[in-house]
Amino acid sequence: MADKKSLSDLAALTNPQPEAPAAEDTAPVAAATEAPAATESEAKAAPDADDQGVSTQGPQIQAVLREQQLDKQGRAYATGRRKDAIARVWLKPGSGKIEVNGREQEVYFARPTLRLVINQPFGVAGREGAYDVVATVVGGGLSGQAGAVKHGIAQALTRYEPALRTVVKQAGFLTRDSRAVERKKYGRAKARRSFQFSKR
């Protein structure tokens, strides 16, 4: 029984320390008294480890902020798309003026609902009237163009202020809306509409 070693003496067995010949008799006793003290201090230092010495706490993941992306004029640029419309958007700090294809938003998007759509990213981020927007948009109709400008504004806003990305993304404004008109099928009037049935 005297030659059996405990697990606490494993470190002493694998890494023997050179000792003075005079202290050979007292070394085993000293090692036996220090080993339990060391294991108690290790248990206090690592409360999140289980009995096998494996940590049960997962790695600490921190959100990594993206870098601000600006051009030489200090503007953030982004491209927005919706249906067949493509919008190029430049965003910079200002008074909240939005210009689309060289015209004010009230003139270009005469319908109030379309103006509401393009201002949604600013409303979610709490930045109403804080940025000036210059946009050029081609293709599609007014509804698709408004959606493309909104997508572009949301993208440009997160490039100017990367801290707002989480808020804007949760609202769903960074995702390109893939809904588009379904193609017409042969033998049908439209995509799904059948021709009028005539019994005779």
Image (cartoon, rainbow, N blue to C red):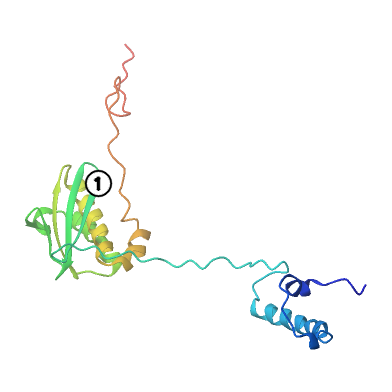
Q: Which residue is mark 1?
A: 82
x, y percent for residue 29: 83, 85
Q: Nearer the viewer, residue 154 or 161?
A: 161
Residue 49 on image: x %, y %: 66, 71
- Quarter of the image holding residue 70? bottom left
Left or right: residue 42 compared with residue 176:
right
Instruction: Answer with left or right where residue 46 lies relative to residue 84.
Output: right
Residue for point 84% across, 72% down? 5
Which residue is at a point 21% across and 46% down the rendered structure image?
A: 144
Q: Quarter holding the N terminus?
A: bottom right
Marks counted in the figure total 1
Name the one closer to the observer, 56 or 166. 56
Instruction: Point out the residue furthest to the front here.
Output: 21
Q: Quadrant of the C terminus?
A: top left
Element under disc 1: strand
Q: Quadrant of residue 162?
A: bottom left
